[in-house]
Image (cartoon, grey):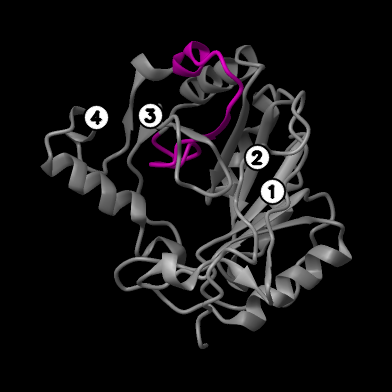
Amino acid sequence: MALNSKIEWTEATWNPVTGCTPISDGCKNCYARRMALRLQKMGNKRYSNGFRVTLHYDLLDHPLKWKSSKMIFVNSMSDLFHEDVPLDFIKAIFKTIKNAHWHTFQVLTKRAERLSDLSSELEWPNNLWMGVTIESGKYGFRADLLKRVPARVRFISFEPLIGPINDIDLTGISWAIVGGESGPGCRIIKKEWVKTILSICRRHNVLFFFKQWGGTNKKKTGRILDGKIYDEMPPILGRGMKEKVFGSPEKAEAAQLNC
């Protein structure tokens, strides 16, 4: 668990499931797998299975113990809709989300097909934001599957953005996150890809959050796009807009990738 997440678009993480398996091109340099194997070597009991899917029943009610309101990313170290996660366990997570109504929960999956198949069997509380990852135009179909889900806020993470997305219908989508890949073996992101998604978002009135250029040194490359930081987010019930300070373009480093 992390009460102060370093992920730019959230505040905390909750991992009742750990571990996953590759499903698409964006999984090639998975940060969660790299982290899980490192924690396994360090003797962390949560990762004794390495990156095999593992259910942590003792963590199901963990957010209920956090009394102050948090933006919580669910399963940053897994995929809730992995085929090895039983429906009853997913329902238990959703029950905690509903009961912890003072928090806002963000769920992100690449398994949009299973999400769509199970959505009618789940209760969707207002404090749950549901998203899918689309790393290139090849996976644009996930947006259409997401639209079938009755979540109050639907969002798309275009991260790691490893290819162009020139034509995607964002009708019914509230929010888009865009980011380049970082870490060992990271693939390039092109500025025109980012600006195309920004243009599509503006056309569909979708809020736009640019997370990072990425690269081997993501702190150096930063998150400025044409002299501006984009950190738009949907309103949080009971809190207004997100209360997280990101800094200003004037103080942030203006480096960008030459690609």
Q: Amino acid at mark 4?
A: Arg
Name which residue lies at 76% across and 27% down.
237
Q: Amino acid at mark 1?
A: Phe
Seen from the viewer's position, the closer of residues 34 and 212 is 212
* Real-space CA distance between mark 3 and mark 4, rounded to the nearest whole angstrom: 11 Å
Give the side of residue 116 with respect to residue 27, left or right.
Answer: right
* Real-space CA distance between mark 1 and mark 3, rounded to the nearest whole angstrom: 23 Å
Where residue 181 appears, as percent x and y from the top left, is 45, 67
Q: Secondary structure at mark 1?
A: strand
What are the residue bounds of the magenta stretch? Answer: 61-84
Tell me the residue that label 4 is attached to: 46
Tell me the residue that label 1 is attached to: 155
* Real-space CA distance between mark 4 and mark 1, rounded to the nearest whole angstrom: 29 Å
Tell me the residue that label 3 is attached to: 1
Where residue 4 appears, as percent x and y from the top left, is 45, 35
Alpha-carbon neighbours of circle 4 within 10 Å: few (<14), some, or many (≥20)?
Answer: some
Q: Which mark is residue 169?
A: none
Mark 4 or mark 2, earlier in chain: 4
Tell me the residue that label 2 is attached to: 130
Residue 216 visible from this viewpoint: yes
Seen from the viewer's position, the closer of residues 84 and 219 is 219
Name the quadrant containing residue 201. Answer: bottom right
1 or 3: mark nearer the eye: 3
Q: Amino acid at mark 2?
A: Met
In the rendered structure, are the residues bearing label 3 and label 4 in contact, judged by CB atoms less than 8 Å apart? no
Mark 1 or mark 3, earlier in chain: 3
Q: Amino acid at mark 3?
A: Met
Seen from the viewer's position, the closer of residues 236 and 197 is 236
In the rendered structure, are the residues bearing label 3 and label 2 in contact, judged by CB atoms less than 8 Å apart? no
